[in-house]
Amino acid sequence: MTSRELESEYFESNPLLKWPKKVSRLKTTRNIIIISLSKLMPLKLKNKLLRAIGVKIEEDVAIGLSTQLDIFYPEKISVGKGSVIGYRSTILTHEATTKRFSKGKVEIGENVLIGANTTILPGVEIGDGASISANSLVNRDVEPGQSVQGVPIKQKSDEE
């Protein structure tokens, strides 16, 4: 695994003001409504709703209450079999600075544990069996089986 892979575009001024030129308003409105509704739904119904907007969710996935998925590009998110995403986590597939707009896939492997209130940035791949502690910022790839924590993430030591 490598560092984040992003498609970036540069602008003379704030790129977030130009989002309707990148993504349709109708699609974004639909995504906002479905993602908002899914936050309060039982797991099976939540997964079905999220699949309807393009999120790739395999079997036995649990996405916690109030988890926020990217409203512009939810179809760039994939979650492997048996993974758990904790309460109020955020998964982004786009990011913006004052001059740059970037987007990238988020690939979560099988049997991954993501703790509550974790933020995952675009372009990240999380390997099978990885574990991410609550309140972490995932700003780089996580190797299979690796346990990480913190803002930004770092390898957990054996004592932790």
Image (cartoon, helix red, strand yellow):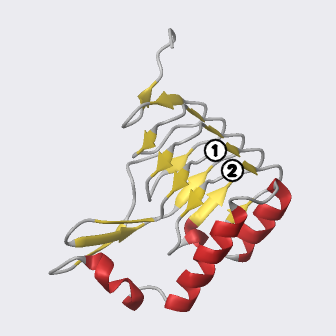
Residue 69, position as x, y percentages in the image: 57, 62
For the residue marked with disc 2, what is the amino acid? Answer: Leu
Q: Residue at x 85, y 58 (%)?
A: 44
* Circle count: 2
**For the residue labelled by badge 1, is the local secondary structure a helix, a strand or a loop?**
loop
Q: Are marks 2 and 1 in contact (CB under 8 Å)?
A: yes
The quarter holding residue 150 reads top left
Would you call the spot at circle 2 few (<14 residues within 10 Å), some (14-19), or many (20 or more)? some
Label 1 belongs to which residue? 87
The quarter holding residue 103 reads bottom left
Gap in angstroms between the C-alphas marked 2 and 1 = 5 Å
Would you call the spot at circle 1 few (<14 residues within 10 Å), some (14-19), or many (20 or more)? many
**For the residue labelled by badge 2, is the local secondary structure a helix, a strand or a loop?**
loop
| Residue 123 visible in the picture | yes
**Which numbered disc, 2 or 1, marks the residue that appears first in the sequence?**
2
The quarter holding residue 104 reads bottom left
Report whether 26 appears left or right of 104: right
For the residue marked with disc 1, what is the amino acid? Answer: Tyr
- Residue 21 position (above or below residue 37): below
Label 2 belongs to which residue? 65
| Residue 54 visible in the picture | no
